[in-house]
Amino acid sequence: MLILRGLLPGDREQALAAHAELARENVDFLLDYDVGVDWAGYLALLSRQHGGIDLPAGRVPADLLAAVQGDDIVGRVSIRYELNDMLALIGGHLGYAVRPGYRRRGHAGRIMALALPRLAARGIDSALVTCAADNVASRKAIEGAGGAIDGEVELLPGYVTLRYRVPTA
């Protein structure tokens, strides 16, 4: 059974391995992770982000949650409870990643299904979720959660981001 939970002190090794795996695809698994900060410091940063405390300019209250099955971290989700200008354009309320070795098992859809009620609990009825137009797996996960196309954005020539609205309840 897949669950979402905050990162724990004992997650360091698996989380750093996931971070390295996804870095090969230019994806940050551990958002805002700085190799110069110890793990306890990083967990404290995530706690402050959750509470919206001491956020840098342009940042919003958010949770970074591990998607865990058994003892394995299979992915993560970033849940943004507010949208700044960039998030409202292409980032959205949810950003998820699944480790390469755990893909094609329905984890992305399950992560989204577990994350959406957290947005609903904050009064967000319709989540903005985006993905690259050529990311078929993400498109299927978003559409499987009830996502409806709300437009597209092309910030760079040839790189199209699809915008979806997904009901949270």
Image (cartoon, helix red, strand yellow):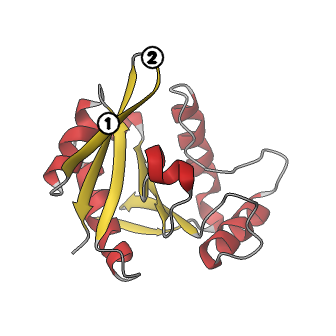
Seen as rendered, the residue at the extreme right is 36
Q: How far apart are marks 1 and 2 (CA)?
A: 13 Å
Left or right: residue 80 versus residue 54 is left
- Vertical order, 106 against 49 (above or below): above
Q: Residue at x 76, y 66 (%)?
A: 40
Horizontal and vertical percent position of residue 89: 46, 46
Say which residue appears at 44% left-offset and 56% top-offset.
77
Secondary structure at badge 2 equals loop
Which of 23/94 is in front?
Answer: 94
- Density class for disc 2 (Cα within 10 Å; few <14, some 14-19, many ≥20) is few
Where is residue 81? Give x, y as percent. Answer: 49, 70
Relative depth, front residue between 49 and 102: 49
Residue identifier under label 2: 157
Left or right, 19 with respect to 108, comes to right
Identity, as a three-letter code, of the amino acid under mark 2: Pro
Secondary structure, mark 1, is strand
Q: Name the residue under label 1.
A: 152
Question: Vertically, is 140 above or below 46?
Answer: above
In this view, 133 is above or below 150: above
Which numbered disc covers residue 77?
Answer: none
- Classify mark 1: residues with Cα within 10 Å, few (<14), some (14-19) or many (20+): some
Whole-percent x, y for residue 27 in the image: 53, 35
Looking at the image, tell me whether mark 1 or mark 2 is earlier in sequence order.
Answer: 1
Q: Where is residue 20 in the image (x, y as percent from the top left)?
A: 60, 35
Amino acid at pointer 1: Glu
Q: Residue pushed farthest top?
A: 158
On the image, which quarter does residue 54 sit in? bottom right
The image quadrant that residue 76 belongs to is bottom left
